[in-house]
Image (spheres, grey):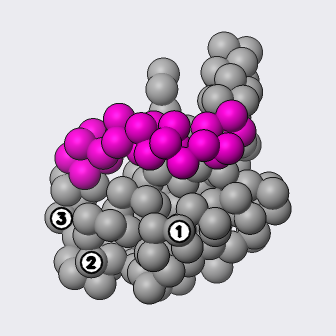
Amino acid sequence: MIRRKIHNRLIRIVELTLEKSKILSDLYTKFFTRMTLNEFDMAELPDKAKILVIGSGPVPHTLLILGSKRNWLITGIDRDERAIKKAKLMIKKRKLEKNVLLKNQDGLTVNLSDYNLVVIAHGVEPKDKLLERIIKDASPKTLILYRTTW
């Protein structure tokens, strides 16, 4: 638990640094592209699938990748208002507003209806409560992608 908290803090620090540079944030996103596409292709989602990413962060690499490579409607949420503002700038610069939406919301209170897939980012806390809430409130047909580094 302590290692996970330290890891999550380090990732936040890295992303706060990367958000200041388009070149660095693009390299960061490129690093995750193949892995992210492979990960989401396993879900076999249809065109126009609705995806919710909880904990999109200031460098929303998952949203950037999926928004540019898949024909899905992607909503990213983060409870950090500053992270959402930074992420919105990245989405706008890359002209992905058509299928990527960002909101300042908490995963414990967001409306879960109508999503084909809900993604819990690796840095989101409290993960256990969030997973319980999604299992309880989402449609039985909704897939859940629970990211973890451990």
Q: Residues within 10 Å of mark 3 (few under 14, many from 20)?
A: few
Q: For residue 9, which quarter of the picture? A: top right
Q: Residue at x 51, y 37 (%)?
A: 24
Q: Position of residue 128 (x, y in %)?
A: 64, 42
Q: CA distance from mark 2 to mark 3?
A: 13 Å
Query: Which residue bears the numbered disc 3?
Result: 44
139 or 100, nearer to the observer: 100
Q: Is residue 57 above or below residue 79?
A: above
Horizontal arrangement in the rendering, residue 37 relative to residue 137 (left or right): left
Q: Residue at x 68, y 23 (%)?
A: 10
Judged by depth in the image, the label closer to the viewer, 3 or 1, is 1
Q: Is residue 16 above or below residue 44?
A: above
Q: Is residue 54 visible?
A: no
Query: In what element is the residue under mark 2?
Result: loop
Q: Earlier in the sequence, mark 2 or mark 1?
A: 2
- Residue type at tag 3: Glu
Judged by depth in the image, the label closer to the viewer, 2 or 1, is 1
Q: Is residue 40 above or below residue 100?
A: above
Q: Position of residue 89 (x, y in %)?
A: 63, 66
Q: Position of residue 70 (x, y in %)?
A: 26, 69
46 or 132, nearer to the observer: 46
Query: Which residue bears the numbered disc 1?
Result: 93
Residue 71: give its label.
Answer: 2
Horizontal arrangement in the rendering, residue 66 relative to residue 23 (left or right): left
Horizontal arrangement in the rendering, residue 35 relative to residue 78 (left or right): left
Q: Residue at x 53, y 68 (%)?
A: 93
